[in-house]
Image (tube, rainbow, N blue to C red):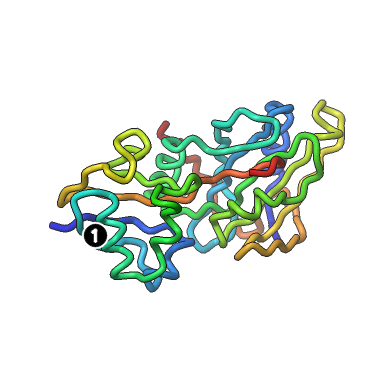
Amino acid sequence: MAIEVRIPTILRTYTGGERVVDGAGSTVTEVIDQLEADHAGIKERLIENGEARRFVNIYVNDEDIRFTGNLQTPVADGDTVVILPAVAGGSAGV
Amino acid sequence: MLTIDRATHDAIIAHARRDHPDEACGVVAGPAGSDRPARHVPMLNAAMSPTFYEFDSGDLLRLYREMDDNDEDPVVIYHSHTATEAYPSRTDVNLAGEPGAHYVLVSTRDGAHESGPVDFRSYRIVDGEVTEEEVRVVDRYDDEAPITQQKAEH
């Protein structure tokens, strides 16, 4: 059994349009490295300066990784990783 | 062009007025591929701010799961500006993550109260480029099938 990784619309340009791809690894970092190996360019959209980007949400089995160890969150076969861009904005500058 | 029914249009404005002076935000989901805003989902602004909005990350996951299960797209993503015009800010453009959505901006700067004017404008935001589009408000959609109400499972 693999790890199921769900790709948001805006990143499907990297996965040839696929909304779900197979992942591998024992942490979120490893899953992202494997994603990068399979779909070059995607990592830069997820990681900045070694951390998950502020406005990208990553969930392992429905838990936001911000609450479970960030990129070191453990992942096992059969788990689901969901990537969703934040829906955010506003009149202020970030 | 964004075509939207009057009830949904008015509900978005009412939401923006209600949350003023904080920014209000939400989504109107519609059948995948239809480009028809059909199911209004007002969201909580987790930032609770007059100058910023963000969906709570748990709410966001539930919303996307629900849309997946219903075979829906986020047809409209809306938020309000409460002291500035209804035009996407640099932040709005930088963070726009749904290239297929109509980004609706509502301004309550002059019309937070019931009788005041509220600007309601719509944009496409793709690869950092903003294109304003016409908004057509209709009483109902022309070829509308009988309305089926779907309850959000929150």
Residue closer to the observer: B150 or A50: A50
Name the chain letter of the residue that bears numbered label 1: A
Give the image quarter of residue B23.
top right
Q: Seen in the image, is B114 located left or right of residue B142?
A: right
x 65%, y 30%: residue: B49
Classify 10 Å Cα crowding around label 1: few (below 14), some (14-19), many (20 and above): many
Quarter of the figure with the C terminus of chain A: top right
Tell me: B144 left or right of B22. left
Residue type (three-letter) at the residue carrying disc 1: Gly
- Residue of label 1: A23
Towards the viewer: B13 or A27 = A27
Which quadrant of the figure contains the N terminus of chain A? bottom left
Residue placed at 82% from the left, 26% from the top? B113
**Of residues A24 and A69, the one drawn nearer to the viewer in this rendering:** A69
Residue A71 placement (x, y as % from top left): 32, 46
Q: Nearer the viewer, residue A37 or B142?
A: A37
Q: Is residue B106 left or right of residue A39?
A: right
| Residue appearing at x 82%, y 34% in the figure | B109
Residue A58 x/y as whole percent: 37, 46
Query: SS at mark 1?
Result: strand
In the rendered image, the residue lying farthest to the left is A1
Q: Is residue B142 above or below residue A57?
A: below
Numbered disc total: 1
Q: Please report the residue visible at 51 percent of the width from the left and 63 percent of the height from the top.
A: B33
